[in-house]
Image (cartoon, rainbow, N blue to C red):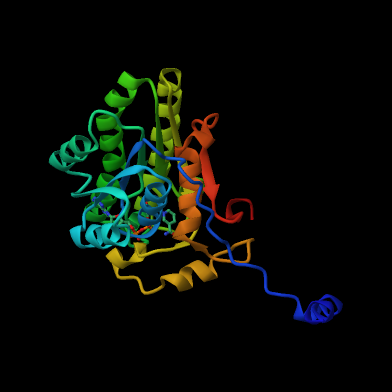
């Protein structure tokens, strides 16, 4: 009877379900994947998903505390935490050594925002810091893992661009330029390594609820995400980005190479 009255009255129709994560069992079984930024936000959600889909995850973050908290959440999973700064060559060597001889995937997710400054206000310090992490760190990890991928004639790399890689952005000039550079690294590498069986793609997240603004003391946080132009009803959580990244990273993305995939609820077409 309750069902009948619900059918008669559109006003009492149930609320649409929020996005529900669907984990693909065993999609990463037998695979070793390096995930940077695994201590927070999109990196953490991606590392978690790969581990829950059976992968061995080399989880990298500058914050050991965040990595330990992440690993403690999944005691059954195969997670190798490596605390280190992706701009540091010794840390890069430790990450690759922890992965072992076979490296199936690399998810370059660690990144920082800038302090939203335009060109005439940006300092050398901000410019250099944003580029060293977002661009040089991304390149260094790719440079370190590609020899193993060439030797095994397979591999999948996913970099993290941004909607700020697709067009001019209200984010500062350093961040926007850095994400355009990530897109360039991605496209040229897809072209160069595709014939060797290595796919290189990037995800371009729209506003996503994470901790990214903390490093520059912005208090906007979730409010920024809610205020941003969006087509879908719900603001993106990190898990929704993890779904896009693991699609590209896994064999589900077998025919996708050199793409900068917007995962932004349609923001890039609005
Ligand atoms: P986040 O701050 O929640 O997580 C980033 C993680 O990277 C942190 O745990 C941090 O400790 C780690 N990290 C920072 N610098 C590092 C370094 N030098 N070495 C190792 N680890 C380091 O941020 P997030 O939003 O999850 O961001 C992940 C990626 O997504 C970034 O590349 C970011 O530019 C991109 N992105 C985010 C949004 C968004 O709205 N959140 C939008 C577009 C793109």
Q: Is residue 203 visible?
A: no
Quadrant assignment for ligand 1: bottom left
Above or below, comparing residue 147 to residue 268 in the picture: above
Instruction: Please give left or right for residue 129 compared with residue 161 in the image.
Output: left
Question: Is the N terminus in the top left, top right, bottom left or bottom right quadrant?
Answer: bottom right
Q: Residue at x 42, y 58 (%)?
A: 171
Q: Residue furthest left?
A: 90
- Which residue corresponds to the image point at 30% horizontal and 19% vertical from the top-left? 151
Residue furthest to the right: 8
Quarter of the image holding residue 30?
A: top left
Residue 155 is drawn in which quadrant?
Answer: top left
Tally of numbered tags? 0
Could you say which is closer to the camera, residue 88 or residue 172?
A: 88
**Viewed as shown, does residue 232 lie left or right of 78?**
right
How far across and down, in percent of the image, does residue 44 sit?
A: 35, 56
Q: Residue at x 22, y 33 (%)?
A: 100
Residue 141 in the figure: left or right of residue 30: left
Q: Nearer the viewer, residue 255 or 56?
A: 56
Do we see residue 33 in this rendering?
Answer: yes
Q: Position of residue 251 (x, y in %)?
A: 49, 34
The structure residue drawn at horizontal position 41% and vertical position 70%, both measured from the top left corner, is: 221
Question: With respect to residue 220, does 146 lie above or below?
Answer: above
In the displayed structure, would residue 253 be above or below residue 270?
above
Screen quadrant of the C terminus: bottom right
Residue 266 is left or right of residue 9, and the answer is left
Residue 125: x, y in percent? 21, 54
Question: Residue 140 location, x and y as percent?
Answer: 25, 36
């Amino acid at each position: 009877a309750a069902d009948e009255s619900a059918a008669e009255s559109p006003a009492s129709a149930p609320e649409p379900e929020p996005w529900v994560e669907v984990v693909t069992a065993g999609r990463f079984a037998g695979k070793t994947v390096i995930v940077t930024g695994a201590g927070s936000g999109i990196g953490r959600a991606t590392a978690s998903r790969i581990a829950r889909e059976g992968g061995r995850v080399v989880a990298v973050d500058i914050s050991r505390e965040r990595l330990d908290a992440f690993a403690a959440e999944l005691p059954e999973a195969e997670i190798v935490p490596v605390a280190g700064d992706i701009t540091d060559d010794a840390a890069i060597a430790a990450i690759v050594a922890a992965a072992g001889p076979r490296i199936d995937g690399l998810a370059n997710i660690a990144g920082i925002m800038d302090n939203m400054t335009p060109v005439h206000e940006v300092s050398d310090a901000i410019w250099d810091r944003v580029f060293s992490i977002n661009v040089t760190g991304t390149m260094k990890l790719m440079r370190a893992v590609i020899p193993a991928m060439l030797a095994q004639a397979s591999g999948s790399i996913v970099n993290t661009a941004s909607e700020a890689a697709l067009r001019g952005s209200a984010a500062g000039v350093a961040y926007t330029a850095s994400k355009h550079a990530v897109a360039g690294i991605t496209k040229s590498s897809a072209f160069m390594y595709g014939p060797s069986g290595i796919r290189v793609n990037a995800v371009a997240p729209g506003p996503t609820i994470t901790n990214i603004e903390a490093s520059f003391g912005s208090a906007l946080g979730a409010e920024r995400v809610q205020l941003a132009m969006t087509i879908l009803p719900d603001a993106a959580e990190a898990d929704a980005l993890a779904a896009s990244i693991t699609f590209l990273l896994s064999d589900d993305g077998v025919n996708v190479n050199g793409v900068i995939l917007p995962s932004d609820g349609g923001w890039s077409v609005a």
